[in-house]
Structure formats: structure tokens, C-alpha cells
């Protein structure tokens, strides 16, 4: 997706009179020496953008016209930024960020021109079919290489869950990515999602026609399930574990050098298993 300039003149959620339930800096989860909370100031958001640059640009080969070593666009000024901190690292908190997620609530997106993912997927039709639901878009997820463990992913989900409970979110959506711009290179994984995990009925979402590429690249009977799971990116497997389904068709993002799929996750699909898994910790931070 093309890079956009940072919208410095865009008012904050609080300035627009929109609800802010989770306070910046409030801890939303903890596992061992790792904490997860929202960014509390521009310094921490800038540090998260630097982490994103290291992952998306230095490691994964994204490209764009950036004046500094930060992955930034105008959505950053209206989103909440969920951050994972390693509390054992030296220096201020801005130097301890090892993972991040960007969170955009529907009411804020509506006041600022829409969701990020509408450039790739027909999200508006989904919103119209579920006008009584409150949506949250998840995006720009990344974790530094040394922290790409099940524990870090679990902590991010602990933070997301607490955030959703506090803001009464009904549905989570967003893009998730396979590396590279050739869907055929991920034929088994994409086909597995298309045949076994595609959202149906009222939850169906398609890639926009001008960017649509098929995910159904192999017949279902030809797919080795174990091999397909092994080839899926960790973030996508994480979504699958908590009950997500995926849209129809994928989109090639040449700037980020990825092949994107769309994630649909109503909260009622995950609430029971999530509470059972995280138990008292998840409830303590979601209260």
C-alpha cells in the first residue's frame, strides 16, 4: 500500500470528543519480564515507528519515500499504539519497545476518512451488514526477531483482549501478510485458508476488484494440512488459533513487498476459549 505523509494537523481522538477508555501508559498485560500497554506520548509512538521500520524495511524489504528511519503514515496520529516492553532492557521505556500493534476504532476511523484496509478489501459492505456492531481494525503488527516467541504473541493478544473488553469492541478486522509479492509462492498456505478458513455468509469480505488475486491455487484434496500450517506466517497462525476467518481473495502490496489477506474476528468467536486460556490475568487487566 502506498506510503502516506504523517497527518500532523489531524486532531487527536480526545480533541474530537471521542471516548478514551484505556489511559495512555496503562498496563494491559504482563508475562514474565514483558509488559504490554498503550503508547503514552509522541516519543513512544516515534520509537514504535522505528521498530516497524527495522522489521518492514530493513528486514522484509518494504520501500517508500521516507525522510527518516520510521514507518509512518497519517493513520498513526489517530490510532492507539499497543506496545510490548522488555522491562529488563536499559534506558527509558522508548528504548525497551520490542513489539507493536496499531489499533483503530470504528468511531475514530469514521471521523477521519475510514479504515486503512479499505484500499485493499471491501470492508464497507461488511460494516453495512453489521451496523449494530462496533469494529476495531488491527494493523502494523511486528515484533523484533529476538522476541518472536509464543509468549510475545500471547502478550499482544492479552493486551488486545483487555482493550476490546474496555472499549466494548464486537468485531476485529485487519490485514495480515505473507512475505513477497507472488501469491503462487504461498499456494499451499493461501489455498488452505481459502478452503478451510474462509468467512461465509454475512461475514464474507472480498478483495477490491481492481486488486483481487485468487487464494484458491490448489484443490482442497491436494493440500497437506501439516505442511500448510508450517508454512503460514506466525501472525496468521495466531489469528487462526483464536478463531479468525479470512476474506476471499488476496492483495499484493508492492510497497510493503507482501501478499495480504483479510482477517475477520467477531469477539463472540473467541471469548470463551480466550478467557479459559488466559484465566485470571486476562480478566484482571480487562476489568
Image (cartoon, rainbow, N blue to C red):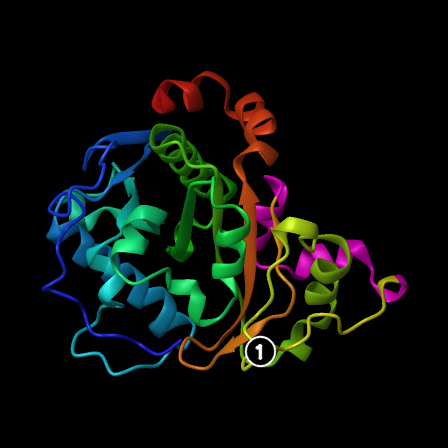
Task: Name the quadrant of the N terminus.
Answer: bottom left
Residue 186 lies, with reference to residue 81, above or below; the image says below
Q: State whether residue 235 appears in this view.
A: no
Main secondary structure found in the magenta portion: helix
Which residue lies most toward the right here? 221
Dot 1 corresponds to which residue?
Answer: 209
Count of picture labels: 1
> Residue 150, percent across and down?
51, 42
Which residue is at 12% across, 47% downward?
Answer: 41
Task: Name the quadrant of the C terminus.
Answer: top left
Query: Considering depth in this image, is 22 or 285 the residue closer to the camera?
Result: 22
Q: Is residue 234 magenta?
A: yes
Tag 1: Cα neighbours inside 10 Å, few (<14), some, or many (≥20)? Answer: few
Horizontally, is 120 left or right of 246 in the view? left
Q: State whether residue 39 appears in this view.
A: yes
Residue 88 lies, with reference to residue 63, above or below; the image says above
Which residue is at 31% across, 49% downward?
Answer: 98
> Residue 202, percent across and down?
64, 50
Which residue is at 49% across, 60% downward?
Answer: 123
Which residue is at 68% across, 57% downward?
Answer: 230
Region in magenta: 221-243
> Residue 104, percent across and down?
33, 50
Which element is circle 1 on?
loop
Q: Is residue 149 magenta?
A: no
Residue 156 lies, with reference to residue 112, above or below; the image says above
> Residue 169, percent across and down?
42, 36
Query: Considering depth in this image, is 148 or 7 the residue closer to the camera?
Result: 7
Query: Considering depth in this image, is 159 or 74 the residue closer to the camera?
Result: 74
> Image quadrant of residue 276?
top right
Amino acid at each position: 500500500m502506498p506510503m502516506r505523509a504523517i497527518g500532523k494537523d489531524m486532531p487527536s481522538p480526545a480533541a474530537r470528543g471521542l471516548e478514551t477508555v484505556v489511559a495512555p501508559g496503562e498496563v494491559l498485560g504482563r508475562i514474565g519480564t514483558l509488559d504490554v500497554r498503550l503508547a503514552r506520548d509522541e516519543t513512544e509512538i516515534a520509537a514504535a515507528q522505528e521498530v516497524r521500520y527495522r522489521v518492514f524495511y530493513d528486514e522484509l524489504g518494504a520501500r517508500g519515500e521516507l525522510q527518516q528511519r520510521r514507518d509512518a503514515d497519517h493513520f498513526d496520529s489517530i490510532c492507539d499504539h499497543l506496545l510490548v516492553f522488555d522491562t529488563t532492557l536499559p534506558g527509558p521505556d522508548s528504548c525497551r519497545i520490542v513489539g507493536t500493534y496499531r489499533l483503530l476504532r470504528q468511531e475514530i476511523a469514521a471521523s477521519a476518512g475510514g479504515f486503512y484496509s479499505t484500499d485493499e478489501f471491501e470492508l464497507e459492505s461488511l460494516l453495512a451488514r453489521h451496523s449494530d456492531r462496533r469494529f476495531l481494525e488491527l494493523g502494523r503488527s511486528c515484533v523484533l526477531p529476538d522476541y518472536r516467541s509464543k509468549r510475545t504473541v500471547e502478550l499482544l493478544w492479552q493486551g488486545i483482549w483487555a482493550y476490546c473488553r474496555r472499549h466494548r469492541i464486537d468485531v476485529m478486522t485487519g490485514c495480515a501478510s505473507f512475505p513477497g509479492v507472488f501469491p503462487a509462492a504461498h499456494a499451499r498456505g493461501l489455498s488452505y485458508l481459502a478452503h478451510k478458513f474462509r468467512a461465509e455468509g454475512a461475514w464474507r469480505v472480498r478483495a477490491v476488484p481492481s486488486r483481487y488475486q485468487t487464494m484458491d491455487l490448489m484443490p482442497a484434496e491436494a493440500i497437506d494440512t501439516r505442511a500448510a500450517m508450517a508454512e503460514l506466517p506466525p501472525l496468521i497462525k495466531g489469528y487462526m488459533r483464536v478463531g479468525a476467518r479470512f476474506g476471499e481473495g488476496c492483495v499484493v502490496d508492492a510497497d510493503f513487498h507482501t501478499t495480504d489477506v483479510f482477517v475477520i474476528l467477531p469477539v463472540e468467536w473467541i471469548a470463551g476459549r480466550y478467557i479459559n486460556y488466559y484465566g485470571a490475568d486476562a480478566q484482571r487487566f480487562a476489568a
